[in-house]
Image (spheres, rainbow, N blue to C red):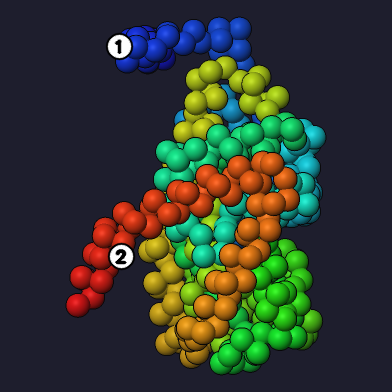
């Protein structure tokens, strides 16, 4: 009875809004779906793994158990870097990862996780939901049979952990650093060497000296990995990841097999998980930063302005070259660049002006 009321109400709402009445897919209405969600993170990893858990729980509970989603940590079903293929082929119905891992599939994927000196979390969500970004993302993943959407944002990250001080751009020369995506290309142009590896392997690589530096996320996640035990200096700001988006990948066929109400539940759960992560990170990074500084005596340092200026110049070159790779990359670049110009104008007299005023 309750469910019928809900459908009637939803129907009335749609009509009142001038839309067409959505007929529930009656044939599938009572069907049960068992979905697997593969992730690029260690199981239950704070922030990232737990966001995947939250998303699975939301979908399962909002659907009254009609979709049961089981979460697999990296390597449990497939390795971290095979999440995209697993969802594309239908080995798993869902994935939870970061789009920049898939630059080998299509260069433009990198625009949907993090662009050096690009959009902040708030700006990224604005571009995705109201600036045309989401439509472009779907167009990009369509050939792979995947529907992407945002499921979390880390906010501004840290520049990373270094075993040497960075006083000038020359200190980046010869540096072996784990830094994925476009930021990695920027570091290479600054003379560094980059290594791509999943989060779970970073601690031992820093410890053994296979890496001189690594970026990961921010205090909350980095403390959990214990990087303070194997690197001395913790630099900010995360110029390379100003507002990294986590992605939910949904196998298109699996999604299309759902009745309409469950489709809405899946996408709405992703939106709720997206909001949850930035709230959690904003709250928990503070506590973790305090622990790192006061308990573990970590040296938290700003990258010098001239280093940041050089990295910004190199970033602009790298992003422009990415835009030239194919037609879709160009289209995404133009959309996001135009959006950044607009949002910067508004931001300078809203967020930026306010934060300045608050600190006077
Ligand atoms: Ca990162």
Distance Cα–Cα, label 2 vs label 1: 40 Å
Circle 2 is placed at which residue position?
352
Q: Quadrant of residue 90?
A: top right
Give the x, y percent position of residue 300: 48, 85
Residue contact at pointers 2 and 1, CB within 8 angstroms: no
Left or right, 41 with respect to 349, comes to right
Secondary-structure class at tag 1: helix
Q: Give the residue drawn at x 39%, y 51%.
A: 342
Q: Nearer the viewer, mark 2 or mark 1?
A: 2
Crowding at label 2, few (<14), some or many (≥20) Cα neighbours within 10 Å? few
| Residue 197 percent across, percent down from the top left | 75, 66
Q: Nearer the viewer, residue 123 or 261?
A: 123
- Is any part of residue 48 visible from this angle? no
Q: Is residue 73 left or right of residue 243?
A: right
Q: Which residue in the protein does label 1 denote?
A: 16
Instruction: State left or right for residue 317 relative to residue 243.
Output: right
Q: Residue at x 45, y 54 (%)?
A: 340
Locate the N terminus and report the quarter of the image it occupies.
Answer: top left
Q: Residue at x 69, y 41 (%)?
A: 327
Q: Quadrant of residue 190?
A: bottom right
**Residue 343 location, x and y as percent?**
38, 52
């Amino acid at each position: 009875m309750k469910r019928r009321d809900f459908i009637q109400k939803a129907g009335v709402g749609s009509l009142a809004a001038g839309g067409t009445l959505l007929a529930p897919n009656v044939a599938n209405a009572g069907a049960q779906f068992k979905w697997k969600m593969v992730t690029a993170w260690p199981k239950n990893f704070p922030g990232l793994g737990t966001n995947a858990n939250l998303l699975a729980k939301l979908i399962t509970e909002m659907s009254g158990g009609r979709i049961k989603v089981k979460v697999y940590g990296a390597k449990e079903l497939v390795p971290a870097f095979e999440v995209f293929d697993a969802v594309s082929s239908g080995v798993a119905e869902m994935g939870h990862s970061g789009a920049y891992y898939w630059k080998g599939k299509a260069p433009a994927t990198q625009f949907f996780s993090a662009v050096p000196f690009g959009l902040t979390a708030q700006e990224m969500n604005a571009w995705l939901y109201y600036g045309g970004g989401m439509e472009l993302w779907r167009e990009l993943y369509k050939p792979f049979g995947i529907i992407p959407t945002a499921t979390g944002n880390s906010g501004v990250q840290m520049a990373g952990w270094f075993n040497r001080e960075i006083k000038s751009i020359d200190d980046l020369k010869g540096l072996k650093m784990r830094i994925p995506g476009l930021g990695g290309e920027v570091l290479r142009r600054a003379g560094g060497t980059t290594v791509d590896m999943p989060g779970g392997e970073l601690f031992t690589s820093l410890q053994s000296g296979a890496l001189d530096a690594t970026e990961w996320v921010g205090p909350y996640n980095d403390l959990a990995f214990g990087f303070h035990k194997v690197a001395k200096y913790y630099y900010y700001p995360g110029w390379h990841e100003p507002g990294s988006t986590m992605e939910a990948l949904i196998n298109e066929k699996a999604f299309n097999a759902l009745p309409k109400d469950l489709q809405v539940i899946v996408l709405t759960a992703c939106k709720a998980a997206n909001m949850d992560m930035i709230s959690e990170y904003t709250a928990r990074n503070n506590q973790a930063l305090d622990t790192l500084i006061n308990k573990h005596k970590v040296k938290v340092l700003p990258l010098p302005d001239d280093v940041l200026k050089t990295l910004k110049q190199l970033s602009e070159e790298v992003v422009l070259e990415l835009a030239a790779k194919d037609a879709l990359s160009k289209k995404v670049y133009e959309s996001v660049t135009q959006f950044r110009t607009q949002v910067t104008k508004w931001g300078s007299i809203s967020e930026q002006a306010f934060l300045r005023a608050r600190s006077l």
